[in-house]
Amino acid sequence: MGKRKRDILEQTAETFDLPGDLVAGLPRIEVVGDREVRMSHHRGILAYGSQAIHISGGKLIVKVRGEGLELRSMNADELLITGQIQALELE
C-alpha cells in the first residue's frame, strides 16, 4: 500500500474515531490463552489440518500451529479455531 493511501486511511480512522484495522480492511486476530484464536476480516482458509491451519488475510497469511486444531465456526467475516495453540505466524 502506498504511503499516501496509508495516510488517508489513518486520517479517516482518526477523524471518525474508528479502529485503523477496520478502515484498512486488515484482519483482526484475538488469541485467548492457548486454546482459542478468533479472526475477523479473513479471506478464507488456505490449508486445514489438526496441526496447522493457514488463513488468508488478504496481503497477510496467518498460520496457526498446534495440536488438535479444529475450525469450530466460520462465516463470511469471522472464524474461530480451538485446540492446543502453540504458535501463530504472520507472513
Image: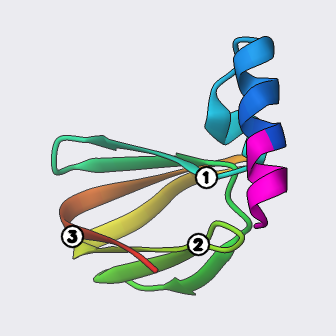
Residue type beneath disc 3:
Ala
Residue type beneath disc 2:
Leu
| Image quarter (top left, top right, bottom left or bottom right) of the N terminus | bottom right
Of the two numbered discs 1 and 3 on the same chain, state the one appearing first in sequence: 1
Residue 40: where, in percent of width, then height? 62, 45
Magenta part, dominant SS:
helix
Which element carries disc 2, helix, strand or loop? loop
Q: Which residue is mark 2?
A: 60
Which element carries disc 3, helix, strand or loop? strand
Residue 7: where, in percent of width, then height? 75, 43
Nearest to viewer (mark 1 / mark 3): 1
Residue drawn at (17%, 41%) of the image: 33
Q: Label 2 to label 1, Cα distance in Å? A: 8 Å
Q: Label 1 to label 3, Cα distance in Å? A: 17 Å
Q: Which numbered tag is attached to residue 27?
A: 1
Q: Which residue is mark 3?
A: 87
